Amino acid sequence: MRIGELARRADVSTRLLRYYEEQGLLAPRRNASGYRDYSEADLAAVLRVRRLLAAGLPTATIASVLPCLRDDGAALVPTCPDLLAELRRERDRMEQAIADLESSRDALTRVIEGGTGVTHVIS
């Protein structure tokens, strides 16, 4: 299938598909005239990438884990022995980022609450 059809079926832009190719997330065949020729497997790969992006993984991580996942319809299933450890590290990184954001939010709340009794002085 051509890039426009893949974009329509995956509900993404053609520009995004080219970006995925640049990032090593997608490797379409090229026909004799140089046009990209996508398969059903490429469509499945794009849908897996979209699910992993929605899970918060960066494209560099997705590129390394994508070959070690299969889609059983309801979930992505790890197929490589070391993948679970890598995904747990990524989840730990996310949890730390969440904790850092919560701490920042709490500090900002304290500043806001501290300023509720302040009156403006015009001189």
Image (cartoon, grey):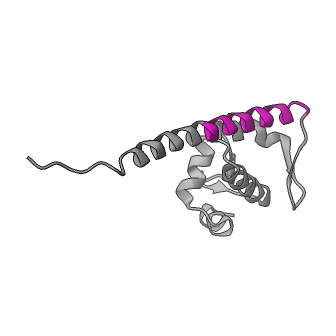
Q: Residue at x 78, y 37 (%)?
A: 87
- x%, y% of residue 97? 62, 37
The answer to which of 59 and 37 lies nearer the viewer is 59
Relative to residue 13, is residue 89 depicted above or below? above
Magenta-span inclusion, residue 12: no
- x%, y% of residue 66? 77, 43
The answer to which of 58 and 92 lies nearer the viewer is 92
- The residue lying furthest to the left in this view is 123
User: In the displayed structure, does residue 15 sit left or right of residue 79?
Assistant: left
- x%, y% of residue 55? 71, 50
Residue segment shown in magenta: 81-99
Q: Main secondary structure of the magenta part?
A: helix
Relative to residue 14, is residue 34 depicted above or below? above
- The residue lying furthest to the front in this view is 117
User: In the displayed structure, does residue 16 sit left or right of residue 120?
Assistant: right
- x%, y% of residue 43? 73, 59
The answer to which of 21 and 63 lies nearer the viewer is 63
Q: How many marks?
A: 0
**Picture quarter containing residue 44?**
bottom right
Relative to residue 21, is residue 41 depicted above or below? below
Q: Residue at x 74, y 55 (%)?
A: 42
Quadrant occupied by the N terminus? bottom right
Q: Residue at x 56, y 41 (%)?
A: 101
Q: Residue at x 75, y 53 (%)?
A: 48
**Picture quarter containing residue 99?**
top right
